[in-house]
Amino acid sequence: MSLHFSIRIASEIAGSQNKLAELLGIPNGNLAAINTGKRPCPIGLRAKIARIAGHDTTRAMLEGLATKLDPEDEYESQALATLQALINAFPEDDEQDATESVGSKPSVSANGPGGKAAPSSGASSTRASPCSRSTNSR
């Protein structure tokens, strides 16, 4: 899920980008710069935006970590490949479905839509966790 898409959905839920920035506790100019890629987005802020947008916060945080790695560096490239495998273990929200569901605007808090904390992604998944696989092959 792109950060830009999450900001757009979260802004629609909050009522505007300015209201989203207020909810996140940051200046609207900073959020606008993050949205256009002119300013990096801290991992914790990515999680808050994803939570408000109703997106998977774990996936958002892993994607944020991936943006900090240099694919040209030998070691960071290896870490990026592993991180991408972890990211792929979390289903990506369908951007078209998510856009269609934004029509009604639920109440919003920093905890997400409806003011409730987002459920942990591991509890509701029927897939095996990538962390539960055996690591004895090293």
Image (spheres, rainbow, N blue to C red):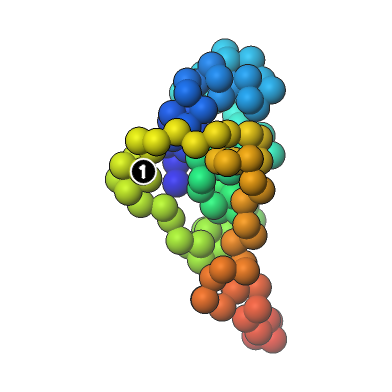
Residue 134 or 125: which is nearer the viewer? 125
Badge 1 is on which residue? 101
Q: Tell me which corner region of the image, top left, top right, bottom left or bottom right, holds residue 2.
A: top left
Which x, y percent locates residue 52?
A: 56, 38
Residue at position x 34%, y 40% in the image = 99
Is residue 104 shown to the viewer in this render? Answer: yes
Q: Tell me which corner region of the image, top left, top right, bottom left or bottom right, holds residue 41.
A: top right
Element on which disc 1 rests: loop
Residue 29 or 15: which is nearer the viewer? 15
Image quadrant holding the C terminus, namely bottom right
In the figure, 91 relative to 101: above or below? below
Which x, y percent locates residue 82?
A: 57, 63
Which x, y percent locates residue 125?
A: 54, 70
Q: Tell me which corner region of the image, top left, top right, bottom left or bottom right, holds residue 22.
A: top right
Is residue 45 shown to the viewer in this render? Answer: no
**Amino acid at pointer 1:** Ser
In the figure, 130 relative to 49: above or below? below
Dot 1 alpha-carbon crowd within 10 angstroms: few under 14, some 14 to 19, many 20 or more:
few
How many numbered marks, from 0 up?
A: 1
